[in-house]
Image (tube, rainbow, N blue to C red):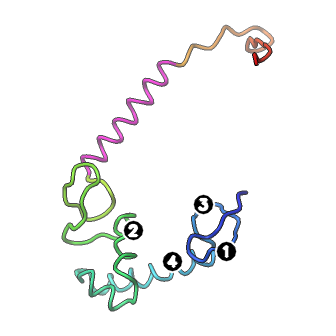
Amino acid sequence: MEMANCRKCRKIYARIRSQICPECEKEEEQLFSVVQDYLRDNPKAPLTQVAEATGVSAKKIMNYLREGRIEVAVPVLQCDGCGTLISTGKLCEDCQKKVASNWENMASSMRANIPAPEAQTSDGPKVTMHTRKK
């Protein structure tokens, strides 16, 4: 388990998955819940109205959009790949498909470059040993 300083409150905590401690993560989730509830009741509210009504900063709400946690009716974000306007996340569908395809091509070429396993003996796989050169 890795020890880290919380990016928000600077306390030391045992990092499992998040950049912030469990207490700050709980606070963040409560803020997100407030925004989410407001958007359920006011689905087409503009960013400034949501920020004013919920007390959550516009910057934080924009982060929720970038993270794909909320979506806007009218695209306001730019795709990081091509600049197309999008409603949520960082990439448009076309760029997401390109990235997925590139990853698959890279994985395929890596699999093709892996040498075939050596012939197996009755005792199991053939293993050779050597000393490390310094």
Residue beneath disc 2: 69
Q: Main secondary structure of the magenta part?
A: helix
How far apart are the alpha carbons under marks 3 and 1? 16 Å
Q: Is residue 113 above or below residue 68?
A: above
Residue beneath disc 4: 29
Q: SS class of the residue under badge 1? A: loop
Q: Callout 3 environment at 10 Å: few (<14), some (14 to 19), or many (20+)?
A: few
Q: Callout 1 environment at 10 Å: few (<14), some (14 to 19), or many (20+)?
A: few
Residue drawn at the location 54% of the way across and 19% of the way down: 114
Q: Earlier in the sequence, mark 1 or mark 2?
A: 1
60 relative position to 71: left or right: right
How far apart are the alpha carbons under marks 1 and 4? 18 Å
Q: Is residue 17 above or below residue 132?
A: below
92 relative position to 62: left or right: left
From the top left corner, tell me how far across and down residue 43 is, in percent. Answer: 26, 81
- Please identify the quadrant where the C terminus is shown: top right
The answer to whether marks 3 and 2 mark residues whose Cβ atoms lie closer than 8 Å is no
* Residue 12 highlighted magenta (yes or no): no
Q: SS class of the residue under badge 2? A: loop
> Which amino acid lies under the numbered mark 4 shown in the image of this protein?
Glu
Q: Which residues are magenta?
A: 93-113
